[in-house]
Amino acid sequence: MWHMDAREAIKQGRVRVDGNLTEITFRAPGMQGKEADMRVRVAHKTNDVYIWTLEEKDAAEWKQLLKLEYLRTAEK
């Protein structure tokens, strides 16, 4: 995966799909402003529900930074 960040720097990452889970790992400035290992995970719960999380590697653990739940609803 290739991505341009807010400072127009190109970032490269690895995408892995395992069933209903898509995982993207890359390096980017973390919460302390230094380059860190980052991970985005998208869990597809149903065709209308999925969970998006952003995590930063902290030593041997992944620390959750952001989490969004997407719910698709019918138009009215």
Image: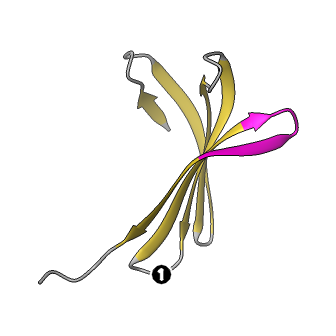
The single residue placed furthest to the right in the displayed view is: 60
The location of residue 54, given as percent across then percent down, is 58, 46
Residue beneath the point at 60% across and 17% down: 33
- Screen quadrant of the C terminus: bottom left
What residue is pinned by disc 1? Answer: 46
Dot 1: element? loop
Magenta stretch prevailing secondary structure: strand
Question: In the picture, residue 32 is in which quadrant?
Answer: top right
The single residue placed furthest to the left in the displayed view is: 76
Q: Is residue 16 above or below residue 11?
A: below
The location of residue 56, given as percent across then percent down, is 68, 37
Q: Which residues are magenta?
A: 57-65
Label 1: how many residues lie within 10 Å, few (<14), some (14-19) or many (20+)? few
Residue beneath the point at 41% across and 80% down: 47
Scheme by which the image is coloured:
secondary structure
For badge 1, the amino acid type reads: Thr
